[in-house]
Amino acid sequence: MPSHIDIRRGRWQKAIDENLNAIAADEHYRAVFGPPQGLLIVYAAHNQHMLAYTAMMTGQSELAVQHIRAMVEGIPLDFVKEHAAVAESLVGLPYEVLIRFGRWDDILAAPDHPDFMPLTRAMRFAARGIALAAKGDVVGAKLEQQAYLAAVTLVPPEKTAGLDTRRTILPVVTPMLAGEILYRDGKGDEGLAKLREAVKAEDALRYSEPPDWILPARHSLGAALMQERRFAEAEQVYRDDLARLPENGWSLFGLAQSLHRQGKEEEAAATDARFQKIWSKADVRLKSSCLCQPGV
């Protein structure tokens, strides 16, 4: 529980350490009593979900991917089937982590999911579309977008992702996917408009930790604005994101870069120092606040 406070204060590494301790306690429980049952399954998943989320914000890709995959492996398939309305969305979380770290080939290699996981199936198509757009295959990305839109119609309205339902989560995913494809298709203004739509939908999500959408849309929007050399606009996007998620590495990097491009060198240097501190254990080198863009 202390890690919730640490996230709100931007103490990401402290939150990582606390969730590592919680996971170790879960493993000890399993060794003594066997696999958790009932709500204990969800609590164990929560610890790994939190760890992956905090590792994402500090650039620790291997730690994030390892634990989000372990989280899914630790949720029995029968439990997902029985509690699909609330548990199924957990199975789709690895796609958000893989997008975060630009693991496009891992996304494209992932197999499809059973029919009783409609939200996860939709998330897979969305992730594939973003991956192909990032790799420059706009035609392929549009085909995945069509598959995603068809899959969305099969997701029941009551399907939840944390505290939010399909009606609130998919309005983040749909314009984010569209924005990435439009931008790569040379339709910059249209792409930026869709990414702004995703930001607005994300801001409307209910408060939760981790958030029900762990891939901040402002990181994508800021990266696209930087590509367009709209540095002052990007600066404001990153400042807004840091007000919501203090000291997260992606927006600190973007803010430092946007300040530097505007000649605000003193503030850029101070921001970069903050970034270097947060990024001290990272295994990812940034050129952009979203690996969907190459950086300027």
Image: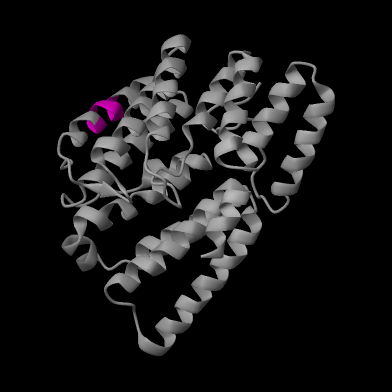
Residue 62: image quadrant is bottom right
Residue 286: image quadrant is top right
In the rendered image, the vertical position of residue 107 relative to residue 146, given as above or below: below
Q: Nearer the viewer, residue 18 or 71?
A: 18
Residue at horizontal 33%, vertical 51%? 162
Residue furthest to the bottom in view is 32
Left or right of residue 14, residue 113 in this image: left
Work out whether residue 4 can be spotted: yes
Work out whether residue 137 can be spotted: no
Left or right of residue 53, residue 86 in this image: left
Residue furthest to the right in view is 266
Q: Which residues are magenta?
A: 143-148
Q: Quadrant of the C terminus?
A: top right
Residue at horizontal 20%, vertical 45%? 118
Residue 28 in percent (x, y) is at 48, 83
In the rendered image, the vertical position of residue 149 relative to residue 7, given as above or below: above
